[in-house]
Amino acid sequence: MKPIIAIQTDFGVGGGSTMRGTCLRVDPELEIYEISHSIEKFNVKAAARSLYHIVPYWPEGTVFVSVIDPGVGTARRASVALLYNGSYVVTPDNGTLTQLLRSPGIKAVRTIDETVNRLKGTEKVSIFHGRDLFAYCAAKLASGIIDFEGVGPEYPVYEIVRYIEPGYTCTSGAVTGFITGIMRTFGNLETSIPISAAERTDIITGDEVRVNISSGSETLYERVIPYRASFGWVQEGEDVLYNSSDGVLGIGINLGNFAQKYGIDPEELPEITVRKE
């Protein structure tokens, strides 16, 4: 079987139709899935988080195409990364690969050679690399027309562009980190605090915990809430700390929108402290 192609962009509904069509022109037998075209516009960190969330749950060898590319047409590299699980990510090297460096890890990375892996007839266009470079090169790779070496010249993994990931600190009975992401459909917030870090401070599911969220000197949220396995263990409308599917602490409201209710924007990277009561 040929590898699956899985596409994410910030193009909006229907935005990937020409990318899909380009892939099928290369090889009509390719199996293509459009994961999402609703990544927040220009938000490279959101693209990185999305890949980190989804890559482990797709078949090994999948060719992921991620196009959140505010620097399209500039000197930033157009790249293909080979992951340690055998999958590929075809993307601008602009920070999108950051979290994949941590897991599953990036084995090698190559620059797309536009002289051979660019859709013919688009040489004078610089604003749609999603179609002209990324989808086209991904289709050639998935179809077997080229192998990884055929993508273009290799460059060192340590040169991959990355952003600084927020960390966390543990003290006696408390752990401090940052709000790093949001499940926008539901308004739940994700943190940089691993479940294991909370456990090291003796904070475990079933506890009552004091949660403080602040931005600089401003306190955005402070109250004692339950730490439970999931939302349904608290009453409707009640706040809850829980273990996110990504292995970190999350905070939300049962049948409510935490970010909206309390006006918390993860892009501002608020600090969060969880302390056992």
Image (cartoon, rainbow, N blue to C red):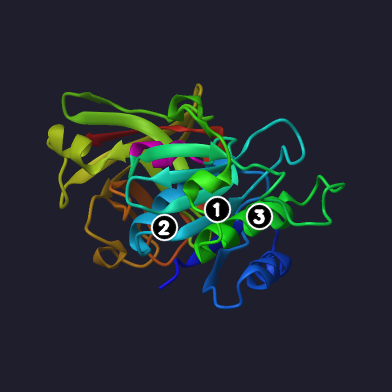
Residue at 15%, 45% in the rendered image: 204
What secondary structure is found at the residue carrying circle 2? helix
Tag 1: amino acid: Gln
Disc 2 crowd rating (10 Å Cα; few below 14, some 14-19, many 20+) is few
Going from the N terminus, do you reach mark 1 or mark 2 first? 2
Tag 2: amino acid: Ile
Q: Is residue 144 above or below residue 177?
A: below
Indicate whether residue 148 is drawn in magenta. Answer: no
Residue 93: image quadrant is top right
Q: Position of residue 24 (x, y in %)?
A: 64, 73
Residue underneath mark 2:
54
What secondary structure is found at the residue carrying circle 1? helix
Going from the N terminus, do you reach mark 3 or mark 1 first? 3
Q: Position of residue 239 (x, y in %)?
A: 36, 54
- Marks 3 and 1: which is nearer the front? 3
What distance separates the C-alpha of mark 3 from that of mark 2? 16 Å
State the mark number for residue 10.
Answer: 3
From the viewer's perspective, tell me whether residue 26 is left or right of residue 109: right
Q: Is residue 31 above or below residue 213?
A: below
The magenta stretch spans which residues? 97-102
Front in this rendered view, residue 28 or 261? 28
Q: Position of residue 215 (x, y in %)?
A: 51, 28
Q: Main secondary structure of the magenta part?
A: helix
Front in this rendered view, residue 254 or 50? 50
